[in-house]
Image (cartoon, rainbow, N blue to C red):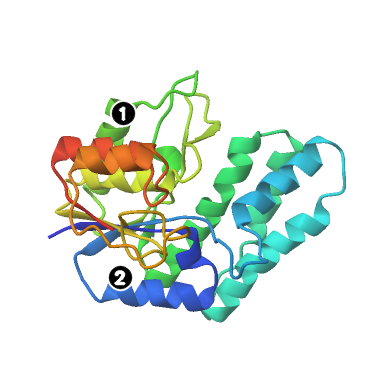
Amino acid sequence: MKKVVKFGGSSLANAKQFKKVADIIKADKSRRYVVPSAPGKRNDKDEKVTDMLYACYDAVAEGRSYKKILDKIKERYNEIIDGLDLNLNLDHEFDKIEENFLAKAGRDYAASRGEYLNGIVMANYLGYEFIDAAEVIFFDDNGNFEADITDKELSERLSHVERAVVPGFYGSRPDGSIKTFSRGGSDITGSLVAKAINADLYENWTDVSGFFACDPRIVSSPRCIDELSYQELRELSYMGANVLHEDSIFPVRQAGIPIHI
């Protein structure tokens, strides 16, 4: 049995959360392919790493001071690494990120580095192979997603890998530049990985307890919906239910792979 598991930013916000995620993955040997988001908020007053990366890149592009923001991002990852007792140093990666920021690599590149770095940390912690999404997920020159090319390359690459971490949210154009999906796009990456390996199940782990009959921020204790069709799930996502990205439905629907939220 093969399962793909995707974890959102809140699930990976700090070392304590990483340990919970690792326990979930190790509890089921069929959870062989992991798609992580960037670290989310640790509390209500905290910042998401993706937003910090946007702010840092914008500061560089506008000629403003950016070092403090970049240092805060480094600190987030170092706290996670230290909390996990990993023998891992991301200084070289951050040097490369700073160099590419100064070279105006683009806001998509900036945003994608949160997932990229979290993927490296997760792969090291689990002992899984790290596969850069830029090498297996593709967009054309105009930024349109290339479904067939992606499925072919992703299937081929993962067929030789028993267990892997593929960071969510981004891929690459023909010239090698980074292109992201819209916010929440790690859900799409998980769906693409599930289709590529013909998974038995796509597990999407999030910080809510499933799909509710109405918005829990408005109605207290709403009923959880036990089962939805792909069409119902997409309609709800399209209408604003933020549990799952609407475009993540198509790949698994095409392959007939169930989604467990």
Q: Amino acid at mark 1?
A: Ala
Residue carrying label 2? 25
Residue carrying label 1? 147
Q: Residue at x 54, y 56 (%)?
A: 117
- Nearer to the camera, 98 or 3: 3
Q: Is residue 89 left or right of residue 8?
A: right
Looking at the picture, how far across and down is residue 204, in whole percent?
A: 32, 57
- Placement of the N terminus among the 4 image quadrants: bottom left
Q: Is residue 99 left or right of residue 44?
A: right
- Nearer to the camera, 67 or 128: 67
Q: Residue furthest right?
A: 64
Q: Residue at x 38, y 71 (%)?
A: 21
Q: Is residue 130 visible?
A: yes
Looking at the picture, how far across and down is residue 148, in whole percent?
A: 27, 27
Question: On the image, which quarter does residue 150 sit in?
Answer: top left
Looking at the picture, how far across and down is residue 101, in whole percent?
A: 72, 41
